Amino acid sequence: QVQLVESGGGLVQPGGSLRLSCAASGSIFSINDMGWYRQAPEKERELVAAITSPSAGITNYADSVKGRFTISRDNAKNTVYLQMNSLKPEDTAVYYCKMAIIVPTSRGTGYLEVWGQGTLVTVSS
């Protein structure tokens, strides 16, 4: 089984910074796309940032976070990060990571989309 464990959430004042981490563990052959999503109360889950496979490393951001958030990955550690700067109250949400993971199977390889458990980010004075 593959598991994603997130860390780094918490309470921060407006204008502050936080760094989220999400590490994958288990039987992993390789990891393709990685992404961060968030869900605020009474709102739908939305994509915040994504980064493509290690060979390309192309990033994509929601307009609301461009210039403030940076997504990165450490392939050796099967980890994705989200550096969040200049945080605003409207960034308050539960943040989830998601990974597209290739896993070994008895017949070769398989494909899984795995979600983290979520970490709460609260931006408030």
Image (cartoon, rainbow, N blue to C red):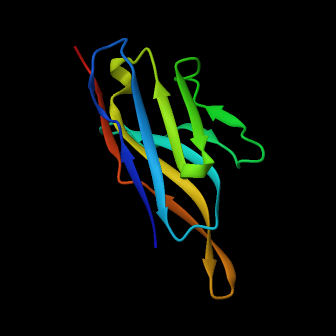
Q: Is residue 4 above or below residue 74?
A: below
Q: Is residue 63 above or below residue 79?
A: above
- Residue 92, position as x, y percentages in the image: 33, 28
The answer to which of 42 and 83 lies nearer the viewer is 83
- Would residue 31 appear left or right of 42 to someone viewing this image? right
- Residue 28, position as x, y percentages in the image: 57, 67
Residue ID at (59%, 48%): 34
Query: What is the number of callouts on the image?
Result: 0
Residue that extends furthest to the front in the rendered view of this protein:
76
- Residue 30, position as x, y percentages in the image: 65, 62
Residue that extends furthest to the bottom in the rendered view of this protein:
106
- Residue 24, position as x, y percentages in the image: 48, 57
- Would residue 53 appear left or right of 81 to someone viewing this image? right
- Would residue 80 appear left or right of 30 to someone viewing this image? left
- Would residue 113 appear left or right of 10 to someone viewing this image? right
Residue that extends furthest to the left in the rendered view of this protein:
125
Residue ID at (72%, 40%): 57
Residue ID at (49%, 34%): 82
The answer to which of 119 and 8 lies nearer the viewer is 8
The answer to which of 99 and 37 lies nearer the viewer is 99
Q: Quadrant of the C terminus?
A: top left
Q: Quarter-wise, where is residue 62 in the image?
A: top right
Residue ID at (60%, 62%): 101
Q: Is residue 108 above or below residue 93?
A: below
Residue that extends furthest to the right in the rendered view of this protein:
55
